[in-house]
Amino acid sequence: MRMVFRWYGEGNDTVSLEQIKQIPGVEGIVWALHDVPAGEEWPMDKIMAYKELADRYSLHLEVVESVNVHEDIKLGLPSRDRYIHNYQRTIEKLATVGVKTICYNFMPVFDWIRTDLYKALPDGSTAMFYEKAKVDSMDPQELVAAIAANPDFSMPGWEPERLRRLAPLFEAYKGVTTEQLWENLRYFLEHIIPVAESSDIKMAIHPDDPPWPVFGLPRLMTSQANLRRLLSLVDSPYNGITLCSGSLGANPDNDIVSMVHEFAGRIPFAHIRNVKVYDNGDFIETSHRTEDGTVDIAGIVRAYSETGFTGYVRPDHGRHIWGEHCRPGYGLYDRALGIMYLWGAWDAAQRERRERKEKSK
Ligand code: DNO
Ligand code: MN
């Protein structure tokens, strides 16, 4: 496995490239042009600026997260072709600086959702939390009204302009069924994957977070069966998955170890993090250690080792510890600790695998 670390860019992240460089085994950054709106072609000069920065620290930029998909593509509007064209050009440009994997998601309207960014854990650290009943009980119209009534209303990871556009977006999605969303995803992939193939860039869809429908909007990337269906939409190694153990793990029915085995060869990128899921469906992001949450992190890492995984891995979110002030989920300390846990689990699994092979000779 090849360890990488998400970095939001200079002036946009509390963690420095110098710090990232000192985390054992980290070889590259996971990056994006966060100031380019979804649907626009990424400008080459901005891409080059990242390349120069990464080069200065001998970190690679082979993984991009995310090139976001314009809502018109998800909605299947006629204007989608223009945005798909821009997406294709962005893929080609990214290939010129050595990008090998692009993570994206296909969630209508919302990316990940949490109800609390800094919920206290018993040890005094804080972490992102999801209160299921709170989201379930929120009617989309109430949400739109709450945003209209409160200019300071915020959602984690959401720019205010996007929040203000929420009402028309909900309106637009009214007629979009789950099956139509699948069709729109197929259309997108049929146009994108050939360009990914010729650019030698693997597309890796991120699961929906949480992995169930929210605010009455359909969601697709929620389960093993649905990920299987995604892979069959366009049967190419360039149509792959960002297997995120935390997003999928919020539903304890999801067997991630089984997914690692089934989807081996189609997982260019792995997000490995733990969540603690409560009986009422609430969940909190905990440290990476298996014992600290509901997800069998050590078992997942062993499964990657057993399947000969050679893709990229990042620790995904962490808690906020030791008084660190950072982007929610994206501090230095807990993610660095997470990486060391992942390496420990990986090295143990690799050794066990080697010894097993030796014995069977
Ligand atoms: C959650 C995170 C996500 C992810 C985007 C990918 O697990 O990894 O925020 O970055 O959804 O497009
Ligand atoms: Mn993730």
Image (spheres, grey):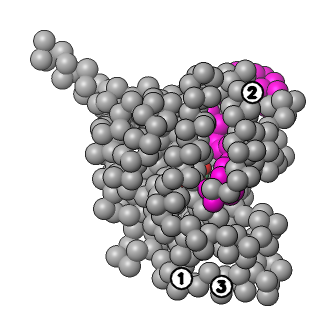
Q: Residue 8 in the image: state x and y as whole percent.
A: 73, 45
Q: CA distance from mark 1 to mark 3?
A: 15 Å
Q: CA distance from mark 3 to mark 2?
A: 40 Å
Identify the residue shown where x is 56% and y is 45%.
187
Crowding at label 1, few (<14), some or many (≥20) Cα neighbours within 10 Å?
few
Identify the residue shown where x is 33% and y is 57%.
254
Q: Work out whether mark 3 precedes mark 2 in sequence or the reverse, and give the earlier one.
A: 2
- Residue 149 lies in the magenta-colored region: no
Residue pointed to by mark 3: 141
Q: Secondary structure at mark 2?
A: helix
Inspect the image, locate mark 3, and give the three-letter code of the amino acid beneath it.
Gln
Identify the residue shown where x is 74% and y is 52%.
79
Q: Residue furthest front?
A: 78
Q: Secondary structure at mark 1?
A: helix
Q: Work out whether mark 1 precedes mark 3 in sequence or the reverse, and give the earlier one.
A: 1
Residue pointed to by mark 2: 93
Q: CA distance from mark 2 to mark 1?
A: 42 Å
